[in-house]
Image (cartoon, rainbow, N blue to C red):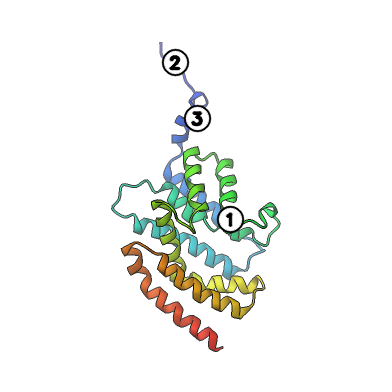
Amino acid sequence: MSANISGSALPNLERDDFMKKEEMIQKAEDFMLDSFQSEDIPAVIANGMIRHLLQTRRYILVLTEGSKRDTTALEIAALLHGIERAYKRGRKFKELRGKDHETRSAMITQEFMKKNKFPRKVIKKTIGLIEKHETAPTAESKILRDADNISFLENTLPIWFETRLWMGEDRKEIIEDCKKRVNEKFKQIKSKKGKELSKKFHKKWCNWLFQKELV
């Protein structure tokens, strides 16, 4: 006599496997898009952030092409590592004020993933990647940082520049910080493929910032 076991009776670890990679990534992308479609955010900034996060995911795929690595958590982290920008001046997630960029994005992502019943192991790995995407102490977090930096260098700098102006920061200070940030991000890229991809972007924005100083 065979046992009739319903899905709800399965152990949690087995149920964790039921959400497919494509479904998880699509849910993360939809959440990111919905988050930036807010009246609190100027369209040029929202569209720029959306492009940056989508490009970061694309560069994850470029940098891991040919490997057998499971990129599920990396791709979700790429899409959501900057999610806190969508709530920076809004009423939601006020409890995150005073925390750093990585922590805010990780906490928002964790709430979203738990609410949508993502597998626990994927949540843990994704949150760890987001929390460390600036310092990148592990091999996987270095892939995320490389992808993030290439995306930033490709076309995010002007959006970052305008976002900081919108936040009320001093123009001269922003220019100086942007110059420093462009050089830092280029130096942080460690993979050979990443360096080759980002060379032309680095040169482009160094020239762009020089022109900004002349205005």
Q: Amino acid at mark 3?
A: Asn
The residues bearing labels 1 and 2 have C-alpha atoms spaced at a distance of 43 Å
Instruction: Mark 2: give few (<14), some (14-19) or many (20+) Cα within 10 Å.
Output: few
Lower position in the chain sequence, tag 1 or tag 2: 2
The residues bearing labels 2 and 3 have C-alpha atoms spaced at a distance of 19 Å
Q: Position of residue 155 (x, y in %)?
A: 46, 71
Residue 29 appears in the picture as rendered? no
The residues bearing labels 1 and 3 have C-alpha atoms spaced at a distance of 29 Å
Instruction: Mark 3: give few (<14), some (14-19) or many (20+) Cα within 10 Å.
Output: few
Contact between labelled residues 3 and 1, with CB atoms less than 8 Å apart: no
Q: Amino acid at mark 2?
A: Ala
Lower position in the chain sequence, tag 2 or tag 3: 2
Of badges 1 and 3, nearer the viewer stands 3
Residue on which the image places disc 3: 12
Q: Position of residue 185 (x, y in %)?
A: 45, 68
Q: Which quadrant, please, contains the N terminus?
A: top left
Residue on which the image places disc 1: 34
Q: Amino acid at mark 1?
A: Asp
Q: Position of residue 91 (x, y in %)?
A: 71, 57
Residue on which the image places disc 2: 3
Residue closest to the eye, 22 or 154: 154
